[in-house]
Image (cartoon, helix red, strand yellow):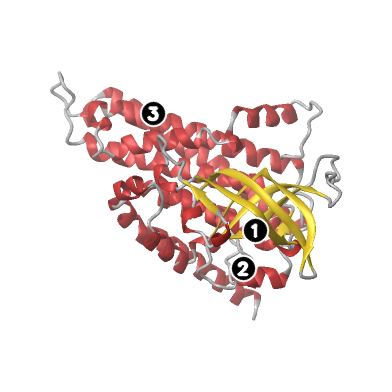
Amino acid sequence: MTAAGTASETAGTRQDLFAAAENFAPEIAARAAEIETNRFLPQDIADRFAEAGLYRLCVPRAYGGYEAHPGDLVRVVERLARADGSAAWCVFIGATSGLVAGFLEPAEAERVFGDPRTITAGVFAPRGKAVRTSQDGVEGYRVTGRWQWASGSRNASWISGGALVFGEDGKPELAAEGVTQNRMMMFRAEDVTLHDTWDVSGLCGTGSTDFEVRDIFVPATRAVSLISDKPLPLPLYCFPTFGLLGIGIAAVALGLARGSIDALVELAGGKTPQGSSKPLAQRAKAHLDVSEADALTRSARAFLMDTISDAWQAASENGEMTVAHRRDIRLATTHAVRSSARAVDLMYTLAGGSSVYRSSALQRQFRDVHVTTQHMMVSDATLELTGRLLLGVPTNIAML
């Protein structure tokens, strides 16, 4: 196939993804209350997301994925989040969980991701303990642990959890950085116990419940380090895993912000605030706050997309990106989430009493965006890290 043909095919698949997100938006908006009450994504929606390829954004093309530019991940997730934050969150988690395919041995990657209906979920935090062993002549690990925040796990066929690795002698195995090795262990869903712990204020429909495994054997071929193992030498897998996680969070937040502006604009023409004779759309306060929210959302999005574009170019041309690229990805994602939360707050407050009713999308967007701000990938600690780098202060960049 010619280079032109490859580019044309890629453009076509991108348009398919964007069209799918656009087509799903009205339905998930209409079913938002159902999704929230259910506390996890209804399986029929998850299955159709899978059929549309939305969970395969970060899976290598070699295994039937899209291996998409991270900017495309933003566009797809952002569009879904304008309609419903929980559905968008599940898509971004399923998509970024597919990154592990770039680290697996080809035969194992085909085994896990060969079925286009495969949905994956996972938690990087090393809450498990993995002890080296063998079973029926196969090298691997016996794994026990319990993890929190397993978004999308009730829809998944494979669920991963980070685990600290120990030798058969009980001694920890050390990574190059001198800390105990942490590997993502991939479990079949039927080997995982899901605990009903997801009773929360926002992103209620993500099913981000606890999960647990006890003394499960995991072959070494399904245990990868997203830090020390070498992935496929392709631009997408040059992006830091934590950076891509932050990009997904930012996309959800930006979509929520844009959705809140949409909701306020729709409301403003027909709402006359109590004690006023002017519709909200004609009040100076509305003009100020809508302008500020729009500027916050658009400028934060522009910074994020510009940063992603620069990093992709470096990865494409050099096979790697600099510390400055990694720093800027983390800074841009955190800034996008904080700016989005401010924009939603403005719209929620401007709407007055209308925004507190369950019938208003603004109350859900307000709750959802303030859950995105609590994620450790976009916390104040991230700004401390990026600030140290901007100031030239010696900094541990292992988590960058």
Q: CA distance from mark 2 to mark 1?
A: 10 Å
Q: CA distance from mark 3 to mark 2?
A: 42 Å
Residue that label 1 marks: 186
Q: Give the mark nearest the N terminus, 2 or 1.
A: 2
The residue labelled by disc 3 is 345
Q: Amino acid at mark 3?
A: Asp
Q: Earlier in the sequence, mark 3 or mark 2?
A: 2
Q: Position of residue 86 (x, y in %)?
A: 42, 47
Check disc 1 and report its element: helix, strand or loop.
Answer: strand
Are the two marked residues, 2 and 1, in contact with CB atoms closer than 8 angstroms?
yes
Can residue 53 be seen here? Answer: yes
Q: Residue 57: tell me if it is visible.
A: no
Callout 2 secondary element: helix
**Amino acid type, mark 2:** Val
Q: Which residue is mark 2?
A: 112
Q: Amino acid at mark 1?
A: Met
Q: Residue furthest bottom?
A: 1
